[in-house]
Amino acid sequence: MTANSTTDLLREHNLRPTRQRMALAALLFDGTARHVTAESLHDQVKDMGITLSLATIYNTLHQFTNVGLLKEIKGIGDAKWFDTNIDQHHHFFDISNDHLIDIPASSITISHLPASPDGKVIDGVDVIVRLSDKSSQKPSGKN
Amino acid sequence: MTANSTTDLLREHNLRPTRQRMALAALLFDGTARHVTAESLHDQVKDMGITLSLATIYNTLHQFTNVGLLKEIKGIGDAKWFDTNIDQHHHFFDISNDHLIDIPASSITISHLPASPDGKVIDGVDVIVRLSDKSSQKPSGKN
DNA sequence: ACAATGTTTAAAATCATTCTAAACTACTTG
DNA sequence: CAAGTAGTTTAGAATGATTTTAAACATTGT
């Protein structure tokens, strides 16, 4: 993604193209699906020789999410993840290495969902398919 | 649940029936489906006039989970939830009041799950159906 | 260039959770 | 049932992720 299109992307979403947001947008929106946490992004940025405070990473991830450039994924590990794939979709989560893989919504068919309670509507459905290594054993329930 | 059967329940799972574990087990395992966080349990116990340290609540929830008396639910809000329903099942999560409702696994049919990556096996599938109030509007993506 | 407003930052604060080490309790053995 | 030992509980400190604060700084419109 060129510097110019990054600028445009930010402006189109009413975000001033600051040095910090340019760096993060360039990194995130290269067209490939990315899954990041605030910490992992911070590390990536640091590796590129750019210094950004962690607070800015959090601010920016939230701003990008608010304008629809990112999607927040909950329920993965202990930290919050952000996904550059903003389509409705689901995830494989590899518990052996904390890796996420997108599953297009169209690849999963959910049928027979029970009716919502009165006065409630379905806001969304999240499916997480946990993966582990074929060889590894589940721990037995011992104290 | 009587004091005696609570004692037995704990012993059957190799847990000493201490005052603290008895109180928590009696509260949790009354036969109805309960969804608790460490904090919510702590508050419930406090309301009954029993004083338990939060650390003990955490310890006990983990021990109960390890022996298969509880199931940990991930991806709900910011805290970890524990469920007395230990069958494989899914959840409605009402985002307006942080309430959980069980959905039996048999009530949802998931088909066409993509194949797992090489060397990986499916460890489990979690479905969370987010609910909101019929009247409330989704926030529009503004900065 | 200047003001006005938006943005970044370091540092402190917060929140959920875990760890630590000392005090305590339940179980076993003599 | 006394004493030892192994398991438990606890307060408080530590951790880790995230948010807040308030001051310094950058961008934009005029």
Image: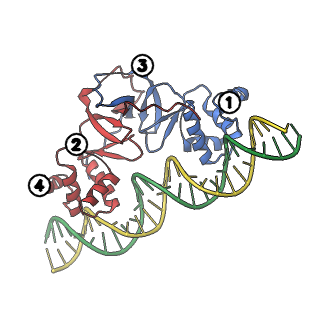
Chain colours: A red, B blue, C yellow, D green
Q: Say whether mark 2 and mark 3 are on the same chain.
A: no
Q: Which of the 4 image quarters holds residue B112?
A: top left
Circle 3 chain: B
Residue at mark 1 to residue at mark 2: CA–CA distance? 50 Å
- Residue that carries the numbered disc 2 in the rendered image: A33
Crowding at dot 1, Cα within 10 Å, few <14 / some 14-19 / many 20+, comes out as few
Query: What residue type is disc 4 on?
Result: Thr
Q: Amino acid at mark 2?
A: Ala
Up the image or down, A101 lies above or below A37; here it is above
Q: Which residue is mark 3?
A: B106
Please tell me in which quadrant of the rendered image residue B90 appears.
top left
Please name which of the two marks, 3 or 2, marks the residue nearer to the observer.
2
> What number is the disc on residue B11?
1
Is tag 4's residue or tag 2's residue first in the polypeptide sequence? 4
Along the line of sight, the residue nearer the viewer: D13 or B47: D13
- The numbered mark at residue B107 is none
Q: Are marks 4 and 3 on the same chain?
A: no
Q: Chain of mark 1?
A: B
Under tag 4, what secondary structure? Answer: loop
Name the one closer to the observer, A63 or D8.
D8
Separation of marks 3 and 2 at Cα, in angstroms: 33 Å
SS of the residue under disc 3: helix
Q: Amino acid at mark 3?
A: Ser
> Which residue is depicted at the point 52% across and 27% down?
B86
Residue type highlighted by circle 1: Arg
Judge the density around disc 2: few (<14), some (14-19), many (≥20) Cα neighbours within 10 Å: some
- Chain designation of label 2: A
Residue A2 numbered mark, or none: 4
Q: At numbered mark 2, what does the secondary structure look like: helix, strand or loop?
A: loop
